[in-house]
Amino acid sequence: SLSDRLGAIFEGLRGKGALEEKDVNEALREVRVALLEADVALPVAKDFIAKVKERAVGAEVLRSVTPGQQVVKIVHDALVDMLGGEEAESGLSFATTPPAVIMMVGLQGSGKTTSTAKIALRLQKREKKKVLMASLDTRRPAAQEQLAILGEQADVKTLPIIAGQSPRDIANRAIEAGKLGGYDVVMLDTAGRLSIDEQLMTEIADIHLATKPIETLLVVDALTGQDAVTTAEKFKERVSVTGVVMTRIDGDARGGAALSMRAVTGAPIKFVGVGEKLDALEGFEPKRMAGRILGMGDIVSLVEKASEEMDAAQAEKAAKRMAKGEFDMNDLADQFKQMRKMGGMGAILGMLPGMGKMKKMVDQAGGLDDKEVIHQEAIISSMTKAERKKPALMNAKRKKRVAAGSGTSVQEVNKLLKAHRQMADMMKKMGKGGMKGLAAQMAG
Ligand code: GDP
Ligand code: MG
C-alpha cells in the first residue's frame, strides 16, 4: 500500500526533527502515483501535491508515528479539505417560492433517472417534502416510462406522460402542476447523450434558463474516471452546476474523479450512488472518500482511535479539576493511562489539535517516551495518597523511598515532579475559559 511505500522511504528518518524537502519530495512522488492510479486528473494532482508540500516541509517529526505515516496524514487531511472539509455540504437548498426546481443533467447512462428517483424518495422520506418528478427525455424510447415505474416503486408522483410534447413543454407543464398541486419540489430528469454535443447542451441551457432551478445536479459515473472530468467541464460552461451526484461508487472506482470534480466544477459533491436500488444513495463524506483514494484506512484509523479512546467524560472531569488548579498526581496518572492506551505519548500529543505546545513542553522537560511513561506510572503508584494529592510533600527522603519502591532513580522521580509542575502551571494559566477548549480537544 501507499503507506508501506512511504514507510520504506522514511526508514531512518524517525526522530530527525523536521521533515526535509528532499524526503518530502520523495514521499510525494509516491503520493502522486497513487493519485493518478486513483484517476485524479493530472493538473489537479499537481496542484494538490504543491499544496501538501507547503504543509509538509518543515513539519515536526512526531515520535510515535513514522515520518511516512505523518506525510500520509498530511496528505489525507489536505484531501479532506479539498473534497469539502469535515462538514460536507450534502444538503439541498429549497430557498425559493415553491416548488423548488431540481434539474438533473449528465451523460446518457450516468445514472440521472435512477438518481432522480433516489433523491426524490429521500426528500419525501427524510425531509417530508412533497415531490413531483418529470422526465424530459423525449429521445430515448421508454425513458419517461422508466421514471414512471421508478416513481411507483418509490411511491413518488410523476407527471402524467403526454406523447409528442417537447422537453420545454414538459418542463413548463411540470412546474405548473407543481404549483397547482402544492408540491414542495419538482425534479426534472433530462435527456443525455453518449457524449457531449452542441444540440444537447443548447437544449439543457434553454431548459435551465426557462425553469430557473434552485439546484442543478450534475450526475457523473465514478467508473468513467477522466471522462467524468471532461463531462463536468463541458456542462459547467453552459449551466451553473450547484452540486454533483457521483454514481457507481459501489463499483471499483478508486474515487479520484471526486477530487477532480470538486476542483473542476467548484461545486460540492452532494450525493453518492452506491447501488441500483432506490435506497442506495448516501450523503457525500469527504473523509471516507479521502481514505478510499489513498487506500490507507490504517493511518486514518490511528487518528480516529486517538479521539475515540480518550474517554470524553474523564477528560472533562480532569479538565474541571485542572481549571481549579487541582491537577494532581492522580490526574497525571490518568493521563498517562489514556495516552498509553492510544499507542504513545508523542503520537497523541502531536495528533490532538492545539496540543503541539504541550508536547514541546513535555519534550523540554526531558521528553516522555513510552517506556518512560511506564516508569512514571510506577513512580506515581509508589507515592502515598497524600503525596499524590500534594506533590509538594516530596522531600529528599520521600523521593528516595519512591525511587526504590518503583525501581527507578531519584533523578527520574525529580523529572516527573518537574513535568507535573510545568503541566499544572500551564493549566492554571490557561484558566477556566481555556480549559473548556482543552477538554473539548481531549475528548476529540
Ligand atoms: P441515465 O441514462 O443517466 O438516466 O441513467 P440511468 O438512471 O438509467 O442508469 C443507468 C444504469 O445505471 C441503470 O442500470 C442503473 O440501475 C445503474 N445505476 C445508476 N446508479 C447506480 C449506482 O450508484 N450504482 C450502480 N451499481 N448502478 C447504478
Ligand atoms: Mg435517463
Image: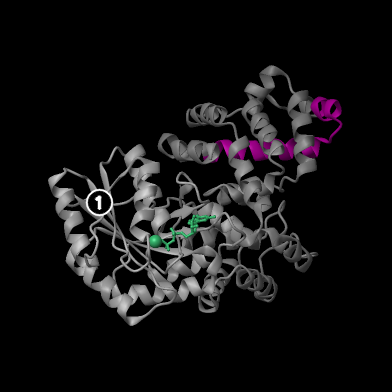
Assign a secondary structure to mark 1. Answer: loop
Question: Residue at image x 53%, y 69%?
Answer: 224
Q: Quadrant of ligand 2?
A: bottom left
Question: Residue at image x 75%, y 24%?
Answer: 381
Query: Residue 184 location, x and y as percent?
Result: 22, 45
- The residue under label 1 is which amino acid type? Leu
Q: Is residue 381 magenta?
A: no
Query: Residue 71 location, x and y as percent?
Result: 64, 63
Left or right side of 216 for 146: right
Question: Residue at image x 79%, y 65%?
Answer: 8
Q: Which residues are magenta?
A: 400-426
Question: Residue at image x 69%, y 32%?
Answer: 337
Query: Residue 218 location, x and y as percent?
Result: 38, 64
The image quadrant of residue 55 is bottom right
Asked whether mark 1 lies closer than 8 Å to ligand 2, one says: no
Q: How is the image coloured?
A: one colour
Asked whether the viewer can see residue 244, the reply is: no
Left or right side of 90 for 307: right
Main SS of the magenta part reads: helix
Which of the image's four quarters has the N terminus? bottom right
| Residue that extends furthest to the top in the rendered view of this protein | 385
How many labels were placed on the picture? 1
Q: Say few, some or many: other residues with alpha carbon within 10 Å of mark 1 (under 14 / 14 to 19 / 20 or more).
A: many
Asked whether the viewer can see residue 29, the reply is: yes
Residue to which mark 1 is pinned: 159
Front residue of 260/120: it is 120
Front residue of 207/284: it is 207
Query: Residue 368 location, x and y as percent?
Result: 72, 45
